[in-house]
Amino acid sequence: MVTTLRKPTIPITEIEQSAFCQTEDELKSKTLAEEFDAGVRWQKLPTEYLKRTPEELDARIAEARARLGPRLVILGHHYQRNEVIRFADLRGDSFKLSQYAASQRDAEYIVFCGVHFMAETADVLSSPSQQVMLPNLTAGCSMADMAHVDDVMDCWDDLHDLFGDTVIPITYMNSTAGIKALCGRNNGIVCTSTNATATFKWAFEHGEQVLFLPDQHLGRNTGLKLGVGLDEMLVWNPFKPLGGHTKEDLSRAKIILWQGHCSVHTRFKVSQIEEARRRYPDVNVVVHPECFMEVVAAADMDGSTEYIIKAVSEAPPGSVWAVGTEISLVQRLAQENPDKTVFCLDSVVCPCSTMYRIHPAYLSWVLDGLNEGVVVNRIEVDEQTRADARVALDRMLAVS
C-alpha cells in the first residue's frame, strides 16, 4: 500500500509545558485568570467562574456535590492538583478509575478529573445509561496525541501487508479509544504500566512480533525486562515510508515501537539521580517506566503510579525517596508521608500541563450544570469503536 504522510508537528502541549515549569511558590500563587493569560489553551468558561476565590469555589463545589448525592461519581487521577482531588470519590490511575466508574451502576453521572483518553475509557467500560464528563475539553494527553489514528492505521496496513497476522498490536492505556479499537479488531490488547510485561508475554504467545503504541520508552523498558535486545527493537517514525526502515530491518525486529513519549517523564535524567545520591547516600530512587531506559537502569526500582505510591507509603520511617514522576503526585506523597523524606528528581516544578487544566472552576461549572439539568462536556464513544475497544480491554483483564 501507499502510506499517506502527514507533515510532522510539535504537539501544542509540548510548547505549553514550559508555561508550567517554574518554582513551586510561583505555581501555587497563580489564579485561574493568570493561567488563562499564560499562553495556554483553555476551554472558555463563564466569566463569573474566573472571578471566584478558591474559598468560594470550594464552597460551591461542596454544595453542588451534596445536592447531586449518589447520582454523581467524581474520579480524580493521581496527577490532579490537590484543590481538585479533594472532591474525588476515588483517586487512582486511569484504568483503576475507569473500573470503579463501571462498578457504580447507580451513578447517572461520572465526572472524570483526568484527561480525554481516560474519560473515553470510562465511557467504554460504563453502562449506556451513564454519562461521562470531562470538566475541561482541552485536557488531552500529548503522548496519546502522538499516535494519530490515521497514522497508526497506515502503519498497521503496512505491517499487515508485510507480515500478516504474525504482528500483534499492543496499545498502552494512554491512547485514544480509536487506537484501542484498532487493537481490538486485530487480535491485539491494551496494557497498563502495571501489566505491560504480562501483555507482552501474551502477545508473543500469539504472534512473532509486537507493535507497541504509543510510548516507545515503556515498550523498550518492557522488552528489555523480557530479554529482548535493543538490536531487536525499532522505532516507527510515522512521517517516513515504512516508518523509516526497510522490509528486512522490520522482519528482524521483535518489537516495533511507535515514536511517542511522555513530556513529563522524559524530563528525568541520570544526572538527576546522581545528584540525589550525592545529597542522600542512602536514597531510594523510584521512577516510572515511561522514563528513558538509562534512567530506569540507574534507578533502584521502577513501576506504575500505583507501584510508586505503594513503595513509598510502605517504606520504613526515616527512609529517603527520590521519585521520578509527575510533581503533583510526588508532593502529595511527601505530605502523606511526613515521617520520610520524599522529593522529586527534577528540581524544576513541572506538572502535567494538560492534567493541570482541570481547575476547580471547571469542576464547579460542570456540577452547577448538572444541578440545573444540563450536561456539559460529555465524552461519548461511538458504538462500533466502543465495542472494538472493549474487546482489547477485556483481553487485558483476562491476561491480568
Image (cartoon, grey):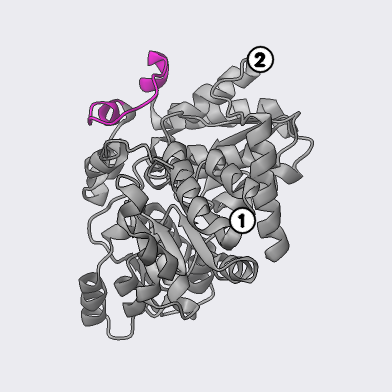
Q: Position of residue 14 (x, y in %)?
A: 27, 43
Magenta segment boundaries in residue numbering? 33-50
From the viewer's perspective, is residue 194 above or below residue 46?
Answer: below
- Read off the residue under disc 1: 189
135 sits to left or right of 206? left
Foreground residue, 7 or 167? Answer: 167
Foreground residue, 130 or 162? Answer: 162
Q: Position of residue 279 (x, y in %)?
A: 22, 78
Name the N-terminal-most of marks 1 and 2. Answer: 1
Q: Is residue 151 visible?
A: yes
Residue type (three-letter) at the residue carrying disc 1 = Ile
Q: Position of residue 192 (x, y in %)?
A: 55, 59
Foreground residue, 8 or 398? Answer: 8
Residue 100 on the magenta segment: no
In the rendered image, which quarter is residue 8 located in? top left
Image mark for residue 373: 2
